[in-house]
Amino acid sequence: MFFIRSGAILVSKKVSGRVEQILSRLESGAFIGEMSVFGDEPKRTATIQADIDTSLLALDRESINNFIKENPREAAHFFRDMARVLIRRLVQSSDLVREVTRWGLEATGLDAERKSGGPRT
Amino acid sequence: MSEPVPATQAGAQGGQQRRTPARLNILIRSEDGASFEVQEITSPAAYLQLRPQRLADAQWELAQLPAGVPGTKRYVLKSRRTEDYLELDDEERFLWEQMDGRASMQDIAVAYVMRYGSFDFEKIPQLISKLLQADLLTLRPMSTLRDILERNKRNPAARAMVATIQAIEKLNVSSRRWNDLFERIHRWGGWLIFTPAAVIGLAVLTAFGTRSLIRLWADLGAISSALGHHAIVAILALKLAFFLTVALHQLVHALACVHYGRRVKEVGFIIHHMVVPTFYADVTDLFMASRRARIVNALAGPTVHLVLGMLGVILADKLGPGLLQACVAASAVLQLQSFLICIYPFSFLEMDGYHVLEDAVSMPRLSQESSHFVWGALWKRLATGRGFNRQEVVYLCYFALSLLSVLGFVGLNAFLILSARHA
C-alpha cells in the first residue's frame, strides 16, 4: 500500500491496445494499493501511472499490524477515515459508470433527450 | 486522506450534468510504452473526430479469398503481430483502407457514403470493434495540434495553449430548433432564389457589376488613398460587414437544404480553426438528396458573396470619391474574393467548390490524400519509374493546380498592395 506524499497519479484500466480509460486522478494524501494489504486477491485491478513528479510512502502488511498493536486508538481513526474514502470512491465509481453510459448514448445517437429537440447550448 | 479527483467531472454533479456533454478521459501509451498522453474525449462530436489508426503496414497482410457467391468479394486480414485472422467483405476492406490515422470517423463515414451510397453507418463502429479486439487498430484522438500539445504538456506554453483552446471551444453555441424558421422563410419567398428567374437576374447583375468594376479600376488610386487615410475605420467596417455576410451565406445554405425537402440539423456559431469566428449550418441531411441538390447547395452559399460584391461595385461606382466609396468598393472586392475562394476548388481549402469537386471525382479527402501522395509516395514512384493510375493522376493534378492557384493569389494580392502603396 502506498500514500502519495506529493504529486499526482492516474489510475487507469486497459480498454484496448495502448488505450486505457482513466478511472481517477489521485493527489497528495490519497492512497493506493490497499487491496494488496487488506485483500487476498493477488490480481492487479488497475494500472497506476505518475502524471507529474510524484513521491510515495510505502506501508506493508507487517507495519500495519504493528501499528494496530501499538496504537489501537489511532489505528481505529485511521481505518474509519479509510472506510470513508473507500465509500466515496464507490460512489464515484457509480457516477463514472453512469457517465460512461451517457457518453455511449450520446456517441451512438441514442440520447433520447437530445433527439427530442432540446437545445444543445 | 484526500479525495480522488473524479476522472469525469460531470459525474458527481447530480442534476446539473445534462448541461455538459459527457466526457471520457483516456490514457494512450506510446508504441514503446515508455511515455503516455492523456486525452479528454467529449461525445458525440469528439467521437466523430477520432482517427482510427491501423497497424503499421509491415504488421498486417490482406488477401482476397477465392470467389464464393458470384458478384461478392471476400478478404482475409491477418495480424502478423498476434497471428489473428479476420474475414472482411468488400465494404469492410474499403473502410480498413481508410483507417490510416489521418481520417476521422466523420471523414470515413463520408467516404463510405460517396463510395457505396449507403447509410449503413453501423458497419463502421462494428468493424472498429472487431479490429480493436484483434489488436489491429488503435483510436487516435483529436487533432495533430492536440497530439503535439499533449506530448509537451510539461511545457507551460503548451499548457497555456491547451487552456486557451478549451476556452475557445466553450464559445461554441448551437441550436437544433431553427429548421422551422428556415422552412417559413423558404415558404414566404426564399424559394424564389432557386428559380430560373433568379439565375437570369444574377447574370444581369453580374454583367452590370463587371462594367462598374472596370470603371472603378480606373479610380483604384483614389480608393486606395482614401482607405489608407482611414485605415482603422476601414478595416473595422470591412470586418464587420464580412462577418454579417457569412451569416447570410449560411442562411442560403440552410434554405437550399429545406428547398430540397431536407432538414437543417443544427445552426451555430463557432471559432473556426480556433481563430476565425463564424456561423455554420449543418446541412448533412442533404446526403439523402440527389447530387444536383448537393451541387446547388454548394453553389448557393458563395453566390451570396457574388451578389453582394456586384451590388457593392455598382453602388461604389455611383458614389463620389471619399471614404464611403472606398469602404464600399473594398468590401465589394472582399466579397468577390470570397466568392472565388468559396467556389474555386483548387486551393487546398475545403470550401464549397472543393466539395463539389470531391463529389464529382468520388474521392473524399482529396486534399489531404493528394498532399500525402506528393510528399510521400510520389518521389519513390518517380525513382522506380512506374506509371501513375487514375487516382494518382487526379492527386497530382489537384496538387499542382492548387499550388499554382495559391501562388497566383498571393502574387495578385502582393501586386494590389504594392499598387496601393505606390498610389
Image (cartoon, coloured by chain):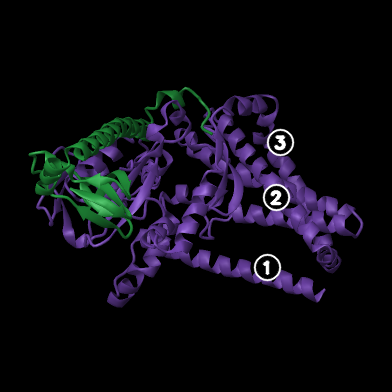
Image-based side of B407 in relation to B122, left or right: right
> Between residues B191 and B233, which one lies in front from this camera angle?
B233
Residue B347: give x, y in percent of width and height: 54, 60
Residue B158: give x, y in percent of width and height: 45, 61
Mark 2 secondary-structure assignment: helix
Residue A1: give x, y in percent of width and height: 17, 48
Which mark sits nearer the N-terminus, 2 or 3? 3
What's the residue at 19%, 39% (across, down)? Answer: A75
Same-chain check, marks 2 and 3: yes
Residue B255: give x, y in percent of width and height: 61, 33
User: Which chain shows up in green?
Assistant: A
Q: Which residue is mark 3?
A: B197
> Between residues B7 and B378, which one lies in front from this camera angle?
B7
Q: Which residue is mark 2?
A: B242
Image-based side of B74 in relation to B36, left or right: left
> Between residues B13 and B241, which one lies in front from this camera angle?
B13
Q: Which residue is mark 1?
A: B413
Asked if disc 1 and disc 3 are in contact, CB closer than 8 Å, the reply is no
Task: Bin the neighbour count of mark 2 within 10 Å (Cα to Cα): few under 14, some 14-19, many 20 and up.
Answer: some
What's the residue at 76%, 50% (across, down)? Answer: B310
Task: Bin the neighbour count of mark 1 within 10 Å (Cα to Cα): few under 14, some 14-19, many 20 and up.
Answer: few
